[in-house]
């Protein structure tokens, strides 16, 4: 009698998952995928756009040096006073980068949805420059204001 009860117990454990249990697991995985994939896509685009932000940073430093040496932002343009020349053809994720009288405009390629970063310097009375970013990257959170 005991042997028969043991066989029933073993057979009960060997049944596997029920259909409803499998359906619940599939539903949970579907919900997680629906949330994770858009977030991952935005994360990868933001990481690619970091190349554009980095290119702007190099030009920004050069504009600050130009301003300190010349005392004005006029003439602090691409290719002058040690400022990198403007980029007209795409390099990596940077489609264009232009510097005109201290204002730096960078546009990403289609890989980063053609988003822009436009930083504008303002002369302070203390002789410092403050920067404001007004590009489309600010609205979507890919760069700081």
Image (spheres, helix red, strand yellow):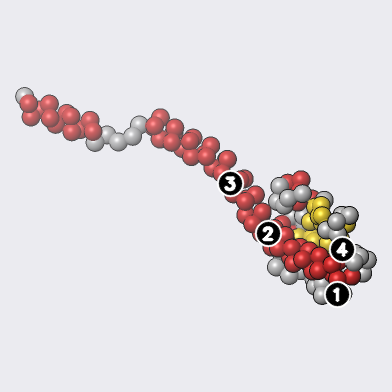
Residue ID for mark 4: 102
- Could you tell which of marks 3 and 2 lies nearer the N-terminus? 3
Tell me whether circle 1 and circle 4 mark residues in contact (CB < 8 Å). no
Looking at the image, is mark 1 or mark 2 nearer the viewer? Answer: 1
- Could you tell which of marks 4 and 2 lies nearer the N-terminus? 2
| Residue at far right of view | 74
- The residues tagged by marks 3 and 1 sit, at their Cα atoms, a distance apart of 45 Å
- Could you tell which of marks 1 and 2 lies nearer the N-terminus? 2
Residue ID for mark 2: 50
- The residues tagged by marks 3 and 2 sit, at their Cα atoms, a distance apart of 20 Å
Identify which residue is drawn at 71% across, 47% down.
141
The numbered mark at residue 81 is: 1
Identify which residue is drawn at 35% across, 31% down.
18
Identify which residue is drawn at 12% across, 30% down.
6
Mark 4: few, some, or many residues within 10 Å (few <14, many ≥20)?
many
- The residues tagged by marks 4 and 3 sit, at their Cα atoms, a distance apart of 39 Å
Q: Is residue 96 visible?
A: no
Looking at the image, is mark 4 or mark 2 nearer the viewer? Answer: 4
Q: Determine the secondary structure under disc 1.
A: loop
- What x and y, as percent, mark residue 118? 82, 56
The numbered mark at residue 37 is: 3
- The residues tagged by marks 1 and 2 sit, at their Cα atoms, a distance apart of 26 Å
The number of numbered badges drawn on the structure is 4
Mark 1: few, some, or many residues within 10 Å (few <14, many ≥20)?
some
């Amino acid at each position: 009698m005991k042997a028969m009860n043991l066989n029933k117990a073993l057979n009960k454990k060997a049944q596997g998952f029920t259909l409803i249990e499998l359906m619940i697991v599939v539903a949970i995985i579907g919900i997680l995928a629906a949330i994770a994939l858009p977030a991952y896509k935005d994360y990868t685009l933001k990481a690619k756009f970091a190349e554009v932000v980095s290119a702007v940073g190099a030009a920004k430093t050069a504009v600050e040096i130009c301003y300190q040496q010349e005392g004005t932002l006029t003439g602090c343009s691409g290719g002058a006073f040690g400022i990198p020349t403007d980029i007209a053809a795409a390099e990596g994720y940077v489609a264009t980068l232009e510097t005109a009288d201290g204002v730096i405009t960078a546009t990403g390629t289609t890989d980063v949805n053609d988003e822009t970063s436009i930083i504008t310097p303002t002369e302070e009375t203390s002789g410092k420059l403050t920067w404001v970013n007004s590009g489309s990257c600010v609205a979507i959170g890919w760069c700081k204001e």
